[in-house]
Image: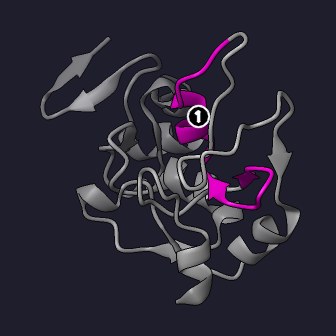
Amino acid sequence: EIAKDALTCKVCLELILPPVQQCPEGHTICDPCLDGLPGQGSKRKQCPTCRTDFSNKRVRNLLADQLAELIPYPCPHNASGCTETMPPSQLSVHAKACEFNPKVVRCPVKGCTWRGEVGDFQDHMLEVECFNHTRAKPNTVSAGKKHIL
């Protein structure tokens, strides 16, 4: 619980995904919130916790990055129903194939277990294995009794 608190962004109140940034005094902040802080040109961004100016070069907290790997982070699709948790280094792989990812589709061919992104579906349908399941002509997908080109 102490580690989760230390890795919670004080601006958005979400767990910080590595790389964890910090102000010169050591207060952590997530990249999106740091990017969203006011301050450009001669007016520097200030830490929302202590009001110390951030330097022009970002300061990464490597210890916090390593600590994050010990904490279970929720799937980015948890608002859609996914209950999986994992270290942050595994989130992107899981999220891409997550059944709650709105960009993921399942092959409608009976017996086919393929799942992937919408843009990859046509390539999948051209695979020999899927054609063996459909017994359809090349470049067609069986949809009920009709064939769609």
Q: Residue visible at 52% across and 89% down?
A: 1
Quarter of the figure that contains the C terminus: top left
**Seen from this angle, which residue lies furthest bottom?**
1
Residue 30: say if magenta.
Answer: yes
Provide the residue span drawn in magenta: 19-40
User: In which quadrant of the rendered view does residue 100 lie?
Assistant: bottom left
Vertical comparison of 9 with 145: above or below: below
Disc 1, SS: loop
Q: In this view, does 131 lie to the left or right of 134?
A: right
Q: Is residue 78 left or right of residue 87?
A: left
**Seen from this angle, which residue lies furthest left?**
145
For disc 1, the marked residue is: 127
Residue 118: say if magenta.
Answer: no
Vertical comparison of 146 with 81: above or below: above
The colour style of the image is one colour
Q: Residue visible at 70% across and 82% down?
A: 70
User: In which quadrant of the rendered view does residue 98 lie?
Assistant: bottom left
Q: Residue visible at 33% across and 66% down?
A: 82
Vertical comparison of 127 with 17: above or below: above
Q: Decide: few, some or many residues near mark 1? Use Cα within 10 Å; few <14, some 14-19, many ≥20.
A: few
x, y percentage for residue 23?
74, 50
The amino acid type found where label 1 is placed reads Glu
x, y percentage for residue 39?
60, 21
Q: Is residue 72 visible?
A: no
